[in-house]
Image: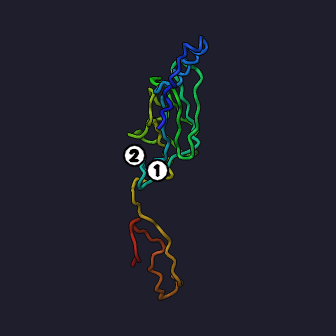
Amino acid sequence: MKNYYTLPKLRFSELGCGGLILGLLLSLITIPGAFAQLSGHVFRDFNGDGVGQTTIPNEPGIGRVKVLAFRQGVTAPLSAVTDFDGFFSFNLLGGQKVRLEFSAFPAGSYESTRGSNNGTAVQFVTTPVAHAGLDLLDPLSYCKEVMPALVALFFVVGDPLAAGSSVASLPALVHFPYSASGQGT
């Protein structure tokens, strides 16, 4: 495997002043670790626990959330938008202090509980950071139970108001556990 970070064995002194400058520039470009990654994930927190689950309930990423990175000593922020799966990233110098601000949440979405996978809509980090995250909660889709009860309409044939009707005592609305299988009685 070829190592792309090594320079060829050239004698830049033989190339004159221009070669020496070129050699210095190439060595600065190829220094590993000069840039650090600042990345993270914005996800839907269905159960409000502040932890992104990949099993039941699967909590997917949220796209199109705006992320601003304000670098220490720089007035203009860097801007990114989360991709379809909720991921974002910035290439910054290592050891740089950054204030992250998340905004433009989908309608009806709010910050959820701060947890092990996420922070708040304003975070202070020092690069490199690989897990700057935010979870959003939609109160209309919140469900504390992992396996909630399901409800269904129960249709019967017959007139429940007719005298001597056998369907009058049957329920019109039934509920059962999410994990139920087979035929009910």
Query: Which residue occupies 44% across, 32% down?
Result: 129
Q: Residue at x 41, y 63 (%)?
A: 149
Disc 1, disc 2: CB below 8 Å? Answer: no
Residue 79, image x and y in percent? 59, 31
Q: Quadrant of the C terminus?
A: bottom left
Q: Nearer the viewer, mark 1 or mark 2?
A: 1
Q: Amino acid at mark 1?
A: Glu
Of callouts 1 and 2, the N-terminal one: 2
Camera-nearest residue between 166 and 136: 136
Secondary structure under badge 1? loop
**Marking on residue 59:** 1
Query: Badge 2: few (under 14), some or many (20 or more) residues near its Cα, within 10 Å?
Result: some
Q: Is residue 80 above or below residue 47?
A: above
Of residues 109 and 133, the one drawn nearer to the viewer in this rendering: 133
Left or right, 18 with reference to 146 = right
**View extreme (bottom): residue:** 164
145 vs 79, left or right, is: left
Q: Residue at x 54, y 24 (%)?
A: 29
Residue 28 image position (x, y, % from top left)? 52, 20
What secondary structure is marked by label 2? Answer: loop
Q: Which residue is mark 2?
A: 49
Q: Position of residue 68 (x, y in %)?
A: 56, 31
Which amino acid type is marked by label 2?
Answer: Asp
**Residue 74 in the image: x percent, y percent?**
56, 19
Q: Kindly identify the residue that appears in the image at 58 percent across and 18 percent down.
A: 22
Query: What's the image's color scheme?
Result: rainbow
Residue with the most extreme top position? 17
